[in-house]
């Protein structure tokens, strides 16, 4: 293969088009389901889920932004909405006052618990059910590698 060609070859083009559909259409489908069933976006669900998996359901906002693949301004707007709904509480980090912690409240845990069943069912329908176990085993390391490359690029390196 000519690595200097400015064009993707047929195999690369097929993979690229399928990946574009996944990265554009999958979030839209998940957003639609979550908005309909829970009144939140896929991004908001992901933020709640990340907090729920953290030690003591608490994280520094800068770390939460990183694991949520978000900018801090975008996350700050979500935190404003979550605080207004009593789903999170923000407070200064006692270990370093320059940082702010977000803690999932009981109401936030409840919102996540109410939202999860239909969301997980939709993820299974759209992502896991179409694939065999062998396909999932191959896809995981490939997507993990792509995700790491993209994150490095976004972090400036």
Image (tube, grey):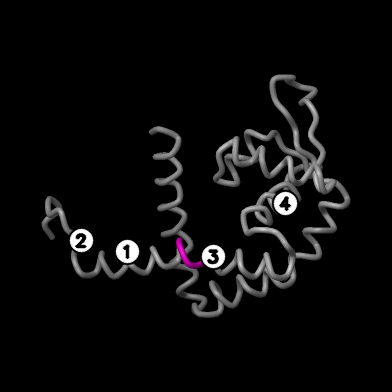
**Element marked by disc 2:** loop
* Residue at image coords 62%, 54%: 43
Front residue of this view, candidates 45 and 56: 45
Q: Residue at x 48, y 67 (%)?
A: 25
Upstream in sequence: badge 1 or badge 4: 1
Q: CA distance from mark 4 to mark 2?
A: 38 Å
What residue sits right under mark 1 in the picture? Answer: 16
- Residue named by callout 3: 28
Instruction: Place residue 101 in its image quadrant.
Output: top right
Which of disc 2 and disc 3 is earlier in sequence? 2
Q: Disc 4 on helix, strand or loop?
A: helix
The Cα–Cα distance between marks 4 and 3, rounded to whole angstroms, is 18 Å
Q: Earlier in the sequence, mark 4 or mark 2?
A: 2
Residue stretch rendered in magenta on the structure = 23-28
Magenta residue check for 90? no
Q: Residues within 10 Å of mark 3 (few under 14, many from 20)?
A: some
Q: Position of residue 152 (x, y in %)?
A: 42, 39
């Amino acid at each position: 293969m000519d690595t200097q060609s400015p064009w993707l070859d047929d195999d690369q083009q097929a993979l690229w088009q399928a990946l574009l559909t996944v990265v554009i259409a999958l979030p839209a489908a998940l957003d639609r389901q979550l908005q309909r069933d829970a009144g939140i976006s896929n991004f908001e669900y992901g933020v709640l889920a990340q907090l729920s998996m953290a030690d003591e359901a608490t994280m520094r906002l800068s770390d939460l932004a990183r694991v949520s693949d978000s900018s801090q301004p975008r996350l700050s707007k979500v935190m404003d909405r979550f605080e207004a709904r009593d789903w999170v509480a923000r407070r200064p980090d006692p270990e370093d006052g320059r940082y702010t912690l977000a803690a999932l409240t009981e109401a936030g845990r409840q919102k996540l618990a109410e939202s999860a069943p239909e969301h997980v069912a939709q993820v299974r329908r759209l992502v896991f059910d179409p694939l065999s176990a062998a396909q999932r085993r191959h896809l995981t390391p490939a997507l993990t590698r792509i995700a790491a490359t993209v994150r490095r690029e976004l972090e400036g390196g």
